[in-house]
Image: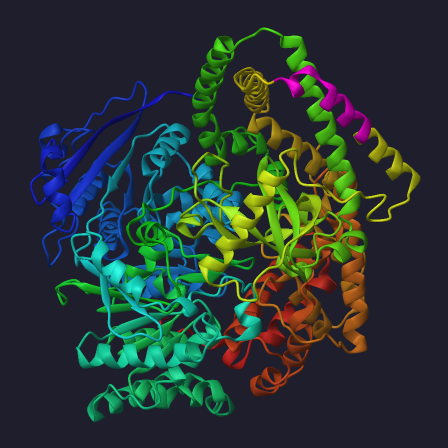
């Protein structure tokens, strides 16, 4: 990796540019982290600047004294001044700041500079809705602005083009002429790069940008901004500045409200001081019997529960809070919920409250009527539209991704005009455009992330709480956190005052990228080039020196440990490893559901091991069968193993203040005097590493901490009573497993255990000697692991994966033996909305040829990810057959990928690739049904159906392009007709922003 140096940090305070504000730091923190910003710059080795220092300052101290490309009606904050100075030096810059701090001013300056020099500029954002909003905002500021999203193209020859990042990546792959005129690319919300599904799109776009283009990255605060800038400097051989500020123009106060209680408790004041006294008073308000609900793992969508407590009192508490906010003139307020149905329920509870004057009501009605003018008569009468007006007139609104787009945009516009005083929203409202309120309320501190309820992380909290406090209007912003159970002080501190999360690469190789790179295969455009230059590889190589340091420290420790009797130690250690290996084999048999479930009754003691982590003995609470969907976030190796469909809720010994930043509980290390807590942890069945003969009785209510701690004492007491280890169930005698191979396995284990117990070390009374022996063995083991980690470069991993994926492409006929892209591959190159391998398979095996365009639209809808329906699928015959063909093709592709050594679980692949939940709905819409009629057919939200239909239209257009590229004229016209049949009515109503 080539050297790039990072020039030292510089802190800039208030309006003068100082060379070091270090001494003022502690005082600064107290003044709501005053107006400071930190500036750093990563510079390629051997780079020298040719800028005039009297106008531009230096690399490490950029200042601009020339004529501004754009003037502002307000004086710039220090971070904005430094950013503008970097832009005027014509160097890339990453601006990392809170949502309300004013990053947009920097983006606007880059656009003004491009206009000044008659160059073009591209502005990318993660979501189509954000691109639409940005287009409107920039069109008011600049004259020549265009928009390119998959749905809409307006003025594609404009000097400033707003687009989604997917469109930019497509332009880079196709070598678009537009890029030859582009001087700057602005990446908004660059922290989206850590998105598991789509993060790779940002990474590839950055890698492919020509080195002459300079970049502006706008990001929420992140803890490794410098590392990101070093990566940019490394791959583009140009300086990249970092301008970082924690400054909030409006300081925040954070209050907590105990549900069912009354009154607010200030826990963090506007100087970011934690008020421990108030926190303790708050904890006292929770009576012993009302502590939390430790054992609920239900998916909130399925249960539709209110405000996580499951009690309807959540609704009355929210009513109480909103009423109080209005009485104290703390409005406008945004009330965040983590569940879309909950948002709507809370808004409906406000029926007695009215926040708008008659004059405001009239304006709302007029804006509403104007907005729905673009809809047909029948669509204006939809319940989703009719129900909204009475709410909006009272100054109450709902905002989530399931709403009709027109309603969502209307709510945004009314909120910006101050006509919505109480907005019930999900966290998507915290993304993108600056729409601040005076107050923000969190209805819960835990959210369902598809797998479990976890505390929200500090990054999520920063993003949402950042909506509180309007610059120039409010002296301070107010955050109110509703809680329904006692909360650890450290958990709260981590959430409210924690550091923002680092940006971590989610780079992966897709067939779409590999094929596009093979098509271009010129010089630097190879998959190898992309892998080498990925942020993922950069982060990995950066960590290597640390691993090397760890190895040498461990080697020093090993040399100091007593080496006498090494052969004896090695033998003893090998016996232990052999036993562990055989026990693992035995447990994979024992934990087959048909064998284990009978013995996993409440109170049974079980041992849990997860990879290298030993959780020790825990107590079974209950066993639940999980639908395959809920296992999606598990590692493929685990999810595919037998019995992973069962979750054993187990009381386990967790370290105190566990579940930091909302993460999962951590096991409590068995250190002397370490006091941990018992928590109910959902455990995959295959993670159980031993079943004990012992059972203990457990209390019916495990919510109080005392109840759980009494079990901890009971388990510890058993540990003292059985110093040789708790008695385990004998699989042959106790569980009745008589399979001869299995019996042989058990005998082998018993034989090895006899040898272990007879070993001199096992009987040795010299505890220090044993500890020294064991530590030595552990150290050697760690050294081996770290060394193999260093050898097993990530690069090699990706190379192997690339080789395997290329094999798949050869088998399916996308490329030939020499890696030359064939007809099929050329079609797949044009498809990035759905599964490119699967859809080209259907194009080439004749599945589409036998269908009419309505069936094609329905079948293509299975490729678009979206909400799941909980209703039973009963498809009409004309759809059932094509769906079966699609599933068969998906199975075949999954099996080919497995044969080519890719880790693919066939059933999971088919389930993820084929999503038939809206086939019927799309079929009927394509055949002319009304929107009201199709909404009767599904339980999926209106907004989600529309979003899917629009992505489907984009997908069908890609398919049309693919068919055209391979000369399939009939298919091309069918895809065009399918797309045409969707494009009507409310599904494709124009955005209010355009």
Left or right side of 117 for 697: right
Quarter holding residue 252: bottom left
Asked whether 647 or 451 is in front, the reply is: 647
Report the magenta residues as a range: 750-764
Quarter holding residue 432: bottom left
Taking the image as drawn, is residue 992 in sight?
A: no
Left or right side of 767 for 747: right
Protein image colouring: rainbow
The location of residue 901, given as percent across then percent down, is 74, 36
- Residue furthest left in the image: 16
Which residue shows up at 47% across the image and 40% down it?
Answer: 505
Asked whether 737 or 864 is in front, the reply is: 737
The location of residue 68, given as percent across then percent down, is 13, 46
The location of residue 351, given as percent across then percent down, is 35, 89
Q: Main secondary structure of the magenta part?
A: helix
Quarter of the image where the C terminus is located: bottom left
Taking the image as drawn, is residue 958 in sight?
A: yes
Asked whether 105 or 549 is in front, the reply is: 549
- Residue furthest front in the image: 721
Q: Is residue 93 above or below residue 363?
A: above
- Residue furthest top in the image: 564
Left or right side of 447 for 733: right
Which residue shows up at 26% across the image and 82% down it?
Answer: 323
Indicate whether residue 761 is drawn in magenta.
yes
Left or right side of 13 for 231: right
Q: Is residue 776 above or below residue 188?
A: above
């Amino acid at each position: 990796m080539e050297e790039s140096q990072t020039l030292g940090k510089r802190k800039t305070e208030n309006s003068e540019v100082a060379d070091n504000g270090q001494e003022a730091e502690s005082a600064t923190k107290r003044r709501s982290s005053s107006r400071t910003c930190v500036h750093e710059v990563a510079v390629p080795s051997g780079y020298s600047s040719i800028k005039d220092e009297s106008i531009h300052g230096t690399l490490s101290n950029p200042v601009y004294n020339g004529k501004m490309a754009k003037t502002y009606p307000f004086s710039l904050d220090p971070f904005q001044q430094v950013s503008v100075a970097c832009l005027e030096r014509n160097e890339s810059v990453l601006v990392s700041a809170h949502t309300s701090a004013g990053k947009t001013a920097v983006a606007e300056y880059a656009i003004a500079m491009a206009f000044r020099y008659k160059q073009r500029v591209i502005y990318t954002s993660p979501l189509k809705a954000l691109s639409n909003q940005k287009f409107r905002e920039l069109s008011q500021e600049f004259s020549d602005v265009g928009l390119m999203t998959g749905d809409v193209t307006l003025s594609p020859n404009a000097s400033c083009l707003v687009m989604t990042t997917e469109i930019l990546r497509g332009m880079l792959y196709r070598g678009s002429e537009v890029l030859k005129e582009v001087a700057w690319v602005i990446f908004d919300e660059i922290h989206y790069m850590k998105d598991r599904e789509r993060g790779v799109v940002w990474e590839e776009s950055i890698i492919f940008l020509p080195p002459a283009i300079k970049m502006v990255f706008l990001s929420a605060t992140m803890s490794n901004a410098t590392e990101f800038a070093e990566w940019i400097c490394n791959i583009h051989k140009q300086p990249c500045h970092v301008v970082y500020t924690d400054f909030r123009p409006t300081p925040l106060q954070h209050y907590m409200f105990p549900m069912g209680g009354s009154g607010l408790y200030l826990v963090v004041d506007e100087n970011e001081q934690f008020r421990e006294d108030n926190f303790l008073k708050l904890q006292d308000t929770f009576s012993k019997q009302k502590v939390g609900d430790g054992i609920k793992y239900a998916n909130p969508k399925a249960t539709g529960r209110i405000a996580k407590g499951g009690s309807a009192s959540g609704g009355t508490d929210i009513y109480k809070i909103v009423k109080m906010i209005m009485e104290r003139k703390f409005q406008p307020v945004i009330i965040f919920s983590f569940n879309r149905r909950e948002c709507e329920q809370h808004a409906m509870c406000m029926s007695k409250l009215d926040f708008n004057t008659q004059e405001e009501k009239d304006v709302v009605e007029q804006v509403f009527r104007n907005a729905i003018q673009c809809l047909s008569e029948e669509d204006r009468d939809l319940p989703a539209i009719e129900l909204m007006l009475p709410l909006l007139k009272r100054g109450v609104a709902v905002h989530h991704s399931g709403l009709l787009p027109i309603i969502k945009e209307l709510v945004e516009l009314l909120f910006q005009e101050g006509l919505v005083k109480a907005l019930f929203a999900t966290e998507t409202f915290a993304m993108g455009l600056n729409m601040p309120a005076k107050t923000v309320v969190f209805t819960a501190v835990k959210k369902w992330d598809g797998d479990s309820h976890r505390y929200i992380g500090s990054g999520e909290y920063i993003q949402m709480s950042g909506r509180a406090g309007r610059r120039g209007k409010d002296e301070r912003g107010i955050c109110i956190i509703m809680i329904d159970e006692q909360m650890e002080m450290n958990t709260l501190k981590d959430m409210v005052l924690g550091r923002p999360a680092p940006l971590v690469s989610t780079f992966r190789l897709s067939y779409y990228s590999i094929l596009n790179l093979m098509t271009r295969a010129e010089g630097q455009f190879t998959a190898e080039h992309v892998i080498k230059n990925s942020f993922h590889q950069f982060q990995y190589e950066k960590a290597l020196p640390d691993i090397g340091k760890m190895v040498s420290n461990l080697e020093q420790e090993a040399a100091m440990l007593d080496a006498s009797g090494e052969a004896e130690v090695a033998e003893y250690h090998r016996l232990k490893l052999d036993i562990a290996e055989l026990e693992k084999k035995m447990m994979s048999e024992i934990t087959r559901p048909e064998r284990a479930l009978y013995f996993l009754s409440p109170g049974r003691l079980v041992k849990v091991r997860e990879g290298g982590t030993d959780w020790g003995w825990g107590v079974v609470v209950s066993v639940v069968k999980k639908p395959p969907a809920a296992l999606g976030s598990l590692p493929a190796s685990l999810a595919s193993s037998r019995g992973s469909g069962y979750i054993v809720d187990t009381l386990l010994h967790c370290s105190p203040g566990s579940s930091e930043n909302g993460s999962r509980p951590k096991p409590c290390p068995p250190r002397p005097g370490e006091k941990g807590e018992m928590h109910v942890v959902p455990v995959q069945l295959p993670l159980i590493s031993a079943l004990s003969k012992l059972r203990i009785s457990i209390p019916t209510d495990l919510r109080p901490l005392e109840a759980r701690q009494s079990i901890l004492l009971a388990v510890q007491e058993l540990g003292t009573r059985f110093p040789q280890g708790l008695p385990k169930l004998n699989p042959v005698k106790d569980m009745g497993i008589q399979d001869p191979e299995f019996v042989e396995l058990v005998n082998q284990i018993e034989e090895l255990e006899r040898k272990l117990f007879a070993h001199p070390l096992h009987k040795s009374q010299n505890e220090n000697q044993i500890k020294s022996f064991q530590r030595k063995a552990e150290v050697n083991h760690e050294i081996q692991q770290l060394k193999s980690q260093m050898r097993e470069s990530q690069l090699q991993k990706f190379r192997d994966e690339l080789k395997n994926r290329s094999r798949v492409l050869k088998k399916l006929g996308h490329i030939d033996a020499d890696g030359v892209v064939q007809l099929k591959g050329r079609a797949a190159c044009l498809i990035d909305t759905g599964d490119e391998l699967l859809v080209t398979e259907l194009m080439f095996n004749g599945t589409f040829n036998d269908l009419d365009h309505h069936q094609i639209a329905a079948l293509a809808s299975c490729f678009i990810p979206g909400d799941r329906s909980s209703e039973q699928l009963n498809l009409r015959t004309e759809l059932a057959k094509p769906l079966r063909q699609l599933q068969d093709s998906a199975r075949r592709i999954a099996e080919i990928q497995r044969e080519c050594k890719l880790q693919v679980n066939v059933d999971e692949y088919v389930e993820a690739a084929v999503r038939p939940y809206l086939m019927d709905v799309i079929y009927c819409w394509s055949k002319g049904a009304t929107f009201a009629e199709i909404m009767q057919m599904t339980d999926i939200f209106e907004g989600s159906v529309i979003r899917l239909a629009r992505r489907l239209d984009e997908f069908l257009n890609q398919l049309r392009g693919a068919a055209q590229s391979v000369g399939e004229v009939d298919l091309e016209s069918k895809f065009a007709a399918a797309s045409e049949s969707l494009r009507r009515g409310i599904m494709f109503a124009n955005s209010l922003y355009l």
